[in-house]
Image (spheres, rainbow, N blue to C red):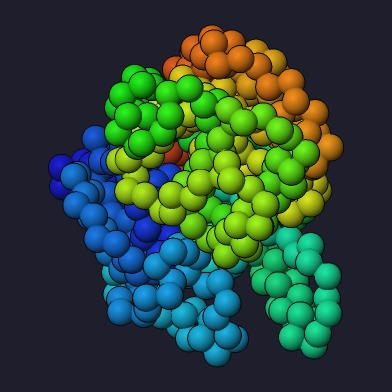
Amino acid sequence: MNDCQRLSICYVVPGHHLLPSAGPTRNVLSTAEALSQWANVTVAFRSILEPIEPKNYTVVEIEPGICHLPCRTDDAAIRGIGIAEFVNYLNVLKQFVLKHLLSYDIVLEKSWLLSGYVVALCQRRQLPGIVVENVMRIRNEPLRVPRDFMRYFLNQLAQALVGRYLRRAPLIIAETEELKRSIIQRWSLPTRQIEVVNLGVDHSVFRALNQEDARTQLGISRHVTMLLYVGVLDQIHSLLPLFDALNFISESSLEIHVVGDGVLKDCYQEIVNKSLNNVFFHGRVPHKDVPQFIAAADLCLAPYDLATFPYGQVAYSTLKIPEYMACGRPVVSVPSGNILNLVHDNITGFLFHNDVKHWISFLMRCPSREDLKKMGILAANVVRSYDWESTARAYLTLCNQVLSKNSERVHLFNQHVN
């Protein structure tokens, strides 16, 4: 520990680039900002796509200069890279540990394809670490070509290594109870090795704003019923069932607004151009502008495709739902995992499976704007206690526990050697 008795913590994020509008970036930076009240915190992403001005913590790059323009819409740092590049990146991580991490008191490692790898490297050098798991990875796509089989084999190998690393890690933080159970089931870990710490909400950013003012500034009619999706445009958050359902609905006062970017953007745009005139794409917007879009909406969407999740359930802690709710908006999502703890059907939002049939049924009986407004007030009350300071305090407590146990082990080892 350093001289002023403040822990020095490095939060390593090997699987993501720093992209302020992306959920993983906001998750990590919000935790770092809150932790910095009591500790000296550094966050390390593979690279920085968009520079930020951190207030009370430091931001560094694991592998500076590797980003190119095409990846600016995606924060996934290792998606699509070849085997040779991945192996090289593992060597980069080794060097990063040796050159930069050994001066810290403790390391946090954000989950990625090879979760626990960085913590394992640190442990070999008597530096304790904690793995922060927020998602489990599983390959659900059909295998069609030899390349798919190779990727499947490598993914299985990676998951076997993850199990080995996690079993040897001093501690794992899971962001939901559902994820904790999935980790235990997948890798046969003891319950005592995993602690659950929920994510927070930045209530200074995500708060209720005047709807009419927001619509005026965004150029959206005051009279339409506006449904909003904010996030990555990918298969996990599938908007296809909603778009298909709109073809069966004649409601002229309904508009769908989409904020975000991703691999399915062109596909979505093509579908909308063919048959829909009430869907509007706004692209990726600055993080500070997102609450204004939420304020303009009557109802917000979190349409997950359960087939893309391990064991068919949303086990991770979805950040967008509590942020929607903190802004006083009800939410449409799926009845699965931690979402059931946030969205209460027909009270603070609506829960149904993300398929065409359910969307048609819902859109045909969509509540009035006044009723949605009342539901939004109740939704805001549900997440009022969610804050990043509570998350950070829990992290700090667990860091101190791991450090205490590590000191005991080192002391016993030295006694044995002597």
Q: Is residue 162 above or below residue 149?
A: above
Q: Quick one: quadrant of the C terminus?
A: bottom left
Check the image and report above or below for 358 versus 108.
above
193 or 56: nearer the viewer: 56
Q: Residue drawn at (54%, 67%), measured in percent from left and top?
A: 117
Q: Name the quadrant containing residue 181.
A: top right
> What percent of the width, then of the height, locates residue 193?
62, 44
Would you say residue 164 is visible in this rendering?
A: no
Nearer to the camera, 356 or 225: 225
Q: In the rendered view, does 144 fall on the left or right side of 62?
A: right
The structure residue drawn at horizontal position 30% and vertical position 33%, both measured from the top left corner, is 217
Q: Position of residue 16 (x, y in %)?
A: 45, 63
What is the x, y in percent for residue 191? 69, 40
**Left or right side of 305 for 320:** left
211 to 103, vertically: above or below: above
Please give the name of the residue rendered at 81% of the width and 48% of the height, measured from the top-left corner: 311
Q: Is residue 244 visible?
A: yes
- Residue at x-position 65% and y-position 13%: 347
